[in-house]
């Protein structure tokens, strides 16, 4: 009955109900006769993607049936059949973090307190996966498109199609997975999966929340560049020019929290994995409501907030 109600609600997966397209399938919004709205990810059926999609489908089911956390998207059920294969999730009203950051009309309501709350939610979810699940789960594709927001702007990590469960008795080497621009730099020369890959991606997503766009140039100039003169010139930028200017500059305690999260994000985005903190360290620091004491002046320089070479917890 659940199967037939989803087919009916989407009119056999009519494109007008499609709300997103991913590497292994499309996501549809389905309003059931009960009045409940769910998100349905339908597996691609083309022959050339069937095997890869099926593996991603199975990984996602395995990962999500092993996790129970408020900041991880809820899996209600799944169907694997010759007719249709799909996963059924909770529907999150605000869509992806990427959509919110790219929507000029909605961005004005995405204030600093909401943004800090999103950072906390993602950190708590990854800490749970890395340090509280047994065996640990590595997401491998943390990006703004895979962070979904509910009506209260609470973050929910989604899309576990590339997730890897770390088994002590098996190889943790695998082929590349992830999104370019968010994937850790060491994946260019090693395919070993470990939690520091997710830490790097978390750092990129956090900076994206802070600056309002993908922070690629900022990361490369402050963290990865071998040119000390370039790092120095970037560090002298006013903080006001780095933060998302589409919303008012933070003040008081909020400014201190934003500064702390910015510093933390650069630490997570270090080019060498051994220099990055664990998500457990990050989560504990966030839980302690750490902040940096700063003047409310808009003349603050980025160098007063970020020392890319270290981060103390």
Image: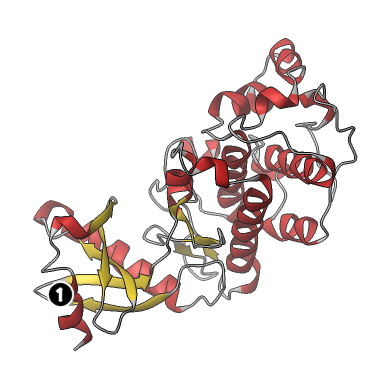
The colour scheme applied to this rendered structure is secondary structure
Identify which residue is drawn at 17% across, 59% down.
50
Is residue 83 shown left or right of residue 191? left
Disc 1 on helix, strand or loop?
helix
- The quadrant holding residue 216 is top right
Q: Nearer the viewer, residue 192 or 150?
A: 150
Q: Is residue 190 visible?
A: no
* Percent position of residue 307, x then y: 80, 31
* Percent position of residue 18, x then y: 23, 56
Identify which residue is drawn at 45% across, 44% down.
98
Residue neighbourhood size for the residue with mark 1, other residues' Cα within 10 Å, grouped as few (<14), some (14–19), many (≥20): some
- The quadrant holding residue 8 is bottom left
Residue at the far top: name it.
Answer: 229
Is residue 247 shown left or right of residue 67? right
For residue 105, above or below residue 41: above
- Residue of label 1: 7
* Percent position of residue 138, x then y: 52, 60
For residue 236, above or below residue 40: above
Q: Nearer the viewer, residue 77 or 196?
A: 77
Q: Is residue 283 visible?
A: yes
Image quadrant containing the N terminus: bottom left
Q: Nearer the viewer, residue 45 or 10?
A: 10
Is residue 46 shown left or right of residue 67? left
Q: How many marks?
A: 1
Is residue 295 shown left or right of residue 269? right
Residue at the far bottom: name it.
Answer: 1
* Percent position of residue 96, x then y: 44, 52
Identify which residue is drawn at 86% across, 33% down.
296
């Amino acid at each position: 009955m659940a199967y037939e109600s989803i087919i009916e609600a989407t009119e056999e997966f009519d494109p007008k109900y499609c709300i997103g397209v991913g590497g292994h399938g499309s996501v549809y919004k389905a309003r059931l006769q009960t009045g409940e709205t769910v998100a349905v990810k339908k597996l691609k059926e083309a022959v050339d993607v069937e095997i890869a999609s099926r593996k991603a489908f199975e990984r996602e089911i395995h990962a999500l049936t092993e996790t129970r956390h408020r900041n991880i998207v809820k899996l209600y059920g799944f169907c694997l059949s010759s007719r249709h294969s799909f996963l059924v999730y909770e529907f999150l009203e605000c869509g992806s973090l990427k959509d919110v950051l790219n929507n000029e009309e909605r961005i004005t309501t995405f204030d600093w307190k909401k943004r800090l709350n999103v950072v906390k939610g993602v950190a708590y979810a990854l800490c749970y996966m890395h340090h509280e699940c047994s065996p640990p789960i590595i997401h491998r594709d943390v990006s703004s498109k895979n962070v979904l927001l509910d009506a209260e702007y609470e973050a929910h990590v989604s899309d576990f199609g590339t997730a890897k469960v770390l088994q002590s008795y098996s190889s943790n080497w695998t082929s590349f997975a992830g999104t370019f621009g968010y994937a850790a730099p060491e994946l260019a020369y090693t395919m070993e999966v470990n939690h520091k890959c997710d830490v790097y991606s978390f750092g990129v997503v956090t900076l994206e929340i802070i600056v309002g766009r993908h922070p690629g140039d900022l990361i490369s100039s402050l963290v990865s560049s071998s040119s000390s003169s370039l790092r120095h010139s970037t560090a002298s930028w006013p903080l006001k020019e780095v933060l998302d200017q589409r919303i008012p500059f933070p003040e008081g305690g909020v400014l201190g929290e934003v500064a702390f999260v910015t510093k933390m994000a650069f630490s997570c985005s270090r080019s060498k994995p051994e220099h990055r903190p664990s998500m457990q360290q990050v989560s504990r620091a966030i839980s302690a409501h750490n902040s940096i004491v700063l003047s409310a002046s808009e003349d603050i320089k980025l160098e007063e907030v970020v020392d890319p070479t270290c981060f103390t917890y």
